[in-house]
Image (cartoon, helix red, strand yellow):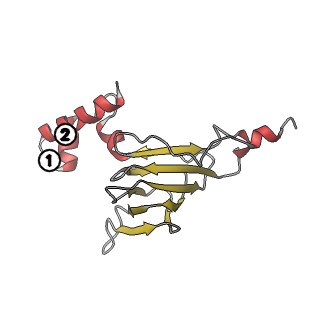
Amino acid sequence: MEVNADDFFKAANLDKPRVTNKVGSNVTLINVMQIAGLNTLGISIARIDYAPLGQNPPHTHPRATEILTVLEGTLYVGFGTSNQPAPNRNKFLSKVLHKGDVFVFPVGLFHFQFNPNPHQPAVAIAALSSQNPGAITIANAVFGSDPPISDDVLAEAFQVEKNTIDYLQAQFWENNHN
């Protein structure tokens, strides 16, 4: 009853490039936290900037399907399934996208985007089927948790030596807790 136009508006400047992070990406998400009018509408949008050779690392959206459109540059994208019955166990689907191409990542499946060009940045817009899609970055969640997951558990799960797990946890702990 008390809504106004500002409840449905955000001066987001999605046309402006963003500075990328350590892995070479920057996700500018516009969801219900930025636009109150998105509440119950089941949509959100994001601009994703990729540095040359940058990536939006493997992650999942537990509450949304994502449709990605490349605005500039080239992206290598993919997603995978897991724990499927034979013969499709752990199927991986990928594609190289160019300006104007579109790719869909089904809800809950891990996916990524990578800019294979060493000289040019890339930009994409992602539309998501939730007002609050959530994001779980796989490596951060596994190796950067607080408190850390036991290196015995992770060494067995990933079938590597404990010192490899210790090294990975140190990388993600430092990045996530400083």
Residue 61 visible, this orientation: no
Q: Mark 2: which amino acid?
A: Ile
Which structural element holds mark 1?
A: loop
Which structural element holds mark 2?
A: helix
Viewer-side residue, 99 vs 126: 99
Viewer-side residue, 88 vs 5: 5
Q: Quadrant of the C terminus?
A: top left
Residue ranking furthest to the top:
178
- Give the x, y percent position of residue 134: 52, 45
Q: Is residue 160 left or right of residue 147?
A: left
Viewer-side residue, 93 vs 103: 103
Q: Quadrant of the N terminus?
A: top right
Q: Which mark is residue 138?
A: none
Q: Which of the 4 image quadrants contains residue 67?
A: bottom right
Residue depicted at 50% across the width and 69% down the height:
101
Query: Which of the marked residues, 1 or 2, is nearer the chain's N terminus?
Result: 1
- Give the x, y percent position of residue 155: 18, 43
Residue depicted at 43% across the width and 67% down the height:
97
The crowd level at tag 1 (other Cα within 10 Å; few <14, some 14-19, many 20+) is few
Q: Is residue 18 left or right of residue 24?
A: right
Q: Which of the 4 image quadrants contains residue 145?
A: top left
Q: Mark 1: which amino acid?
A: Val
Residue ranking furthest to the right:
1
Residue depicted at 41% across the width and 61% down the height:
75
Marks 1,2: beta carbons within 8 A:
yes
Residue 130 visible, this orientation: yes
Residue under label 2: 165
The crowd level at tag 2 (other Cα within 10 Å; few <14, some 14-19, many 20+) is many
- Give the x, y percent position of residue 163: 12, 37
Viewer-side residue, 28 vs 65: 28
In this picture, is 178 found above or below 131?
above
Residue under label 1: 160
